[in-house]
Image (cartoon, helix red, strand yellow):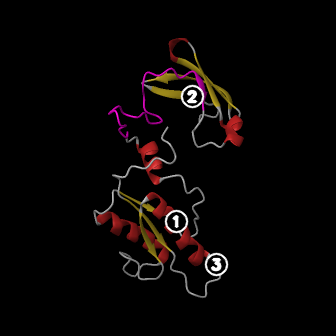
Amino acid sequence: PIAPSFRDPALRIAVVSICAYPPDHPLALPKLTPANRHAYTERHDYALRLHLEPPVIGAHGLGHQHAKLAATLAYLQTGDFDWVAWFDCDSVLMNMDRTLDSIIYQYTQVVPESDDETPVPVCGEHRDWELAGDWLDSWVPPSARDKALVEIQQGPASSVKAFARQFGEVGGRVEDGQLILDFPDGA
């Protein structure tokens, strides 16, 4: 897994939000969200593109619901950013330590290089690893570790058993370099 605070300074990332509420709007979002976005983007050296009033870049008369797509596309098309993340104005970032980089590397299977030029393994990347043992995501807080723990046992001929409080016991196998678990409901 990738550390939740991992930051790749070579990635040019922008955070885009539209908080263009009328001045008399009863919600506190236009006051709360900008400070939240500034704190997060400054902490991780991301570019912030926060729109507090219309017109919004690239929107060309669109309503706010559609302007977010146009604004995100406009920033992507500039070529100034490798990644552009959209956050609705009503979303508040609670975990300021979790980086977008960690999410990008975790789920796009981009493998960052370590100082010694050895690729860092990414969750889901196949290696000839021994799978048996306790598995736990690094971001799980200590108070939830018992509930989130997955125990894997390997048997003969690529057979596998997995145990976890959230799903009980299931069988499975390693096939074509992938771990496949056979859940009773077919999930």
Which dot, 1 or 2, sits closer to the camera?
1
Mark pair 2, 3: CA separation: 46 Å
Q: Which mark is residue 160?
A: none
Residue sitting at x 29%, y 65%: 77
Which stretch is magenta? 111-135
Which dot, 2 or 3, sits closer to the camera?
3
Q: Is residue 40 above or below residue 62?
A: above
Q: Mark 1 points at which residue?
A: 39
Q: In this view, does 71 lie to the left or right of 34?
A: left
Disc 1 marks a residue whose amino acid type is Ala
Q: What element carries label 3?
A: loop
Among the two numbered marks 2 and 3 on one chain, the one whose residue lies closer to the N terminus: 3
- Coordinates of residue 51 in the picture (x, y in percent): 45, 76
Q: In this view, does 8 lie to the left or right of 39?
A: left
Q: Residue 181 carries which label?
A: 2
Q: What element carries label 1?
A: helix
Placement of the C terminus among the 4 image quadrants? top right
- Coordinates of residue 132 in the picture (x, y in percent): 57, 21
Contact flag, marks 2 and 3 (Cβ < 8 Å) = no
Q: What element carries label 2?
A: strand
